Amino acid sequence: MNVLVTGGAGFIGSHLVTALAARGDRVVVLDNFDTFYDPKLKRETAAKLKAEIIEGDLSIEADVAKAFAAVGQGAVVVHLAARAGVRPSIAQPALYSRVNVEGTTHMLEAARKSGAKRFVFASSSSVYGARSNPPFSETDSIDRPVSPYAATKVAGEMLCATFQHLYKLETVALRFFTVYGPRQRPDLAITKFARLIRRGEKVPFFGDGSSARDYTFVEDTVRGITAAIDKSWPQFEVINLGGSRPVSLSEMVAAIEKAAGKKAVLDRQPDQPGDVPLTCAATEKAKALLGFEAKVHLDEGLRRYIAWLDSDEAKSWR
Ligand code: NAD
């Protein structure tokens, strides 16, 4: 199979590219090595991938065209590239809109022009907004996002639905629930906490510790994406990829302390604007349509993450 993966040098993308290459797919990556976090980390990762790397920007049509020319007609597109991160999107809403909304539009337009086989879109649990009544089901309303980032993901889903309606381009939006594991983005809590706890430095701890996330190990997320790549989508679908096992911030810190064998020094701070109190995936649809179930328990995932942090590969990430 020919697959175009945008954001393939990033956290989730690099794991996906590795899994696809291992099963014999031909993979082309479009990534601009953006500066949201140190591009050196992404370049090191990309150098090890078995894929053709096109360095280019989603929000530039000519760069998108170059990537589609490289992968050829009829490819499967997995669109993961985005400006990620909730809090930074509040400071730079127009940038998030340009990359995540305009960039996604360029991708969809190029996909339908090249007769792409299907289009898998990386959405997010953040579309559910600030709710405290779990689990979050795909049929729930998503009309109250609480950050520009979340709003751009809602828009991305809507654009996928539109292109399926207009052009019969097969589209599916996967809502990822807090993904973690080796090469996790440095801005995300588990990476930040693990590094600081291991160094014995103060850990910024927002709110009272009760906010909770449905953490998903990256290997599980990649299995879900791969299942979506392999399936036909006669109508637009939205599917949660999570485990329905929310873990509070306090429990997460305790789990990292256990995995790292060291106590955290907490620097307590108020709740941050844009943050949601809870994420928790309803999992029935993923099971029914993708045969997907999150398998890796947080303790096991953290143990594997900390083991990776100790490995040679993670030298630049410590
Ligand atoms: P990441 O930042 O590690 O990866 C994103 C990649 O996209 C990076 O390699 C980056 O260089 C690239 N990119 C950014 N802007 C680009 C542009 N303009 N043109 C081309 N490439 C560009 O992030 P990630 O955590 O791997 O996230 C992947 C996707 O999953 C994103 O769409 C994100 O919103 C979504 N998501 C992630 C999580 C999570 O917990 N990590 C949760 C929900 C949704």
Image: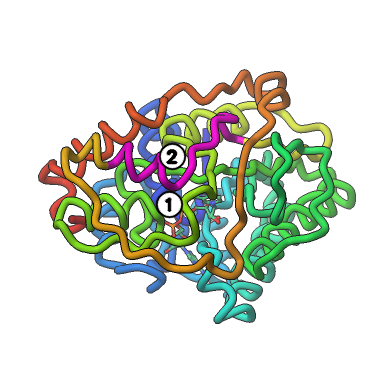
* Residues under numbered marks 1 and 2 in contact, where contact means CB atoms less than 8 Å apart: yes
Secondary element type, mark 1: loop
- Asked whether 223 falls inside the magenta stretch, the response is no
Q: How many marks?
A: 2
Secondary element type, mark 2: helix
**Relative to 162, 32 lies left or right:** left
**Quarter of the figure with the C terminus:** bottom left
Point 31% across, 57% down: residue: 192
Give whichever of 32, 282 is nearer the camera. Answer: 282
Q: Position of residue 97 (x, y in %)?
A: 65, 73
**Is residue 58 shown above or below 183?**
below
Labelled disc at residue 16: 2
Point 53% across, 68% down: residue: 272
Point 19% across, 62% down: residue: 201
Mark closest to the chain's N terminus, 1 or 2: 1
Give whichever of 291, 164 is nearer the camera. Answer: 291
CA distance separating discs 1 and 2: 8 Å
Give the amino acid at mark 2. Leu
**Relative to 157, 104 lies left or right:** left
Report which residue position mark 1 lands on.
8
**Is residue 65 shown above or below 7?**
below
Q: Which region of the structure is painted magenta?
A: 241-256
Give whichever of 74, 314 is nearer the camera. Answer: 314
Residue 27's quadrant in the figure? top left
Q: Is mark 1 within 8 Å of ligand 1?
A: yes
Point 16% across, 46% down: residue: 313
Q: Position of residue 173 (x, y in %)?
A: 69, 44
